[in-house]
Amino acid sequence: EDPDYLASHEATRSELVVPIILEQEVVGVINVEHSEFDAFDDENSLALEALAAQAAIALQNGRLYQNVVHHAELLDAASTVASYANSLLDEEQLLDNIVHIISKRIHVYHVAVFLLDEKNEFVVMQTASSANGLKLIKSGFKLSVQSQSIVATAVRHGDYVLVADVQQDKRFW
C-alpha cells in the first residue's frame, strides 16, 4: 500500500517501468501495466529498454528541432532588425521596432533597450515592449553603471548575464 502508487487501472497486476535516458540523465519513463500476475519477463524488459532508447532519440531530435526553430526565429529577428536599421534613420523608431520584433519573435513579455548617457554614468531605459516598461520610461528610469543591477553588470563587463531566477539574485534591480 504505497501512498504514491497511482492505480490507473483496477485490473493491474504486473507493471514494468523503464527509464528514458537522454545524455546520461533520466528524463522520463515508459510504464506498462498488465492484468496478469508476472506478465513480464526479461524479453519484455529488453524490448521496452530498446523502445525507451528510441524514445530518447526521438526526444533529443525533437529538442534539437526546437532549438533549430528557435535559432531560425532569432536569425529572422536579427535579419528584420538589420533591415530596419538600414532603412530607419530615426533612432527612437528603430529601437521601438527592435523591442517589438524581439518580443514577438522570441515570445517574451518584456524587452527593453537601455542606452548609456553622455557621461557614461547611467544606462537609461529608452524603449520597451511592455506597459510596465513604458511607465518606467515616462518616469525617467535609469540605473547607475556602478550599481550591482543585472543590467549594469552586463554594461560593465561587456558580456551577457544569464540568471535562472531573478528573485533569488541580489542584482535584480
Image (tube, helix red, strand yellow):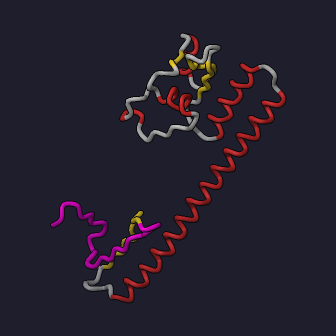
Asked if the stretch drawn in magenta spans residue 18, the answer is: yes
| Residue 45 in the image, given as x and y percentages of width and height | 37, 83
The residue furthest top is 139
Above or below: residue 22 compared with residue 103: below
x%, y% of residue 78?
A: 72, 40
Q: How many marks?
A: 0
Q: Is residue 167 left or right of residue 75?
A: left
Residue at x 31% of width, y 66% of height: 8
Q: Nearer the viewer, residue 29 or 22?
A: 22
Residue 89 on the magenta span = no
Instruction: Tell me which residue sits at (32%, 85%) in the image.
Output: 40
Which residue is painted at 32% across and 77% down in the image? 16
Please say if 86 is above or below 147. below
Q: Which residues are magenta?
A: 1-24
Picture coordinates of residue 63, whole percent (x, y): 55, 59
Q: Is residue 25 above or below residue 144?
A: below
Quadrant containing the C terminus is top left
- Taking depth in this image into account, of 170 and 167 the one nearest to the observer is 170
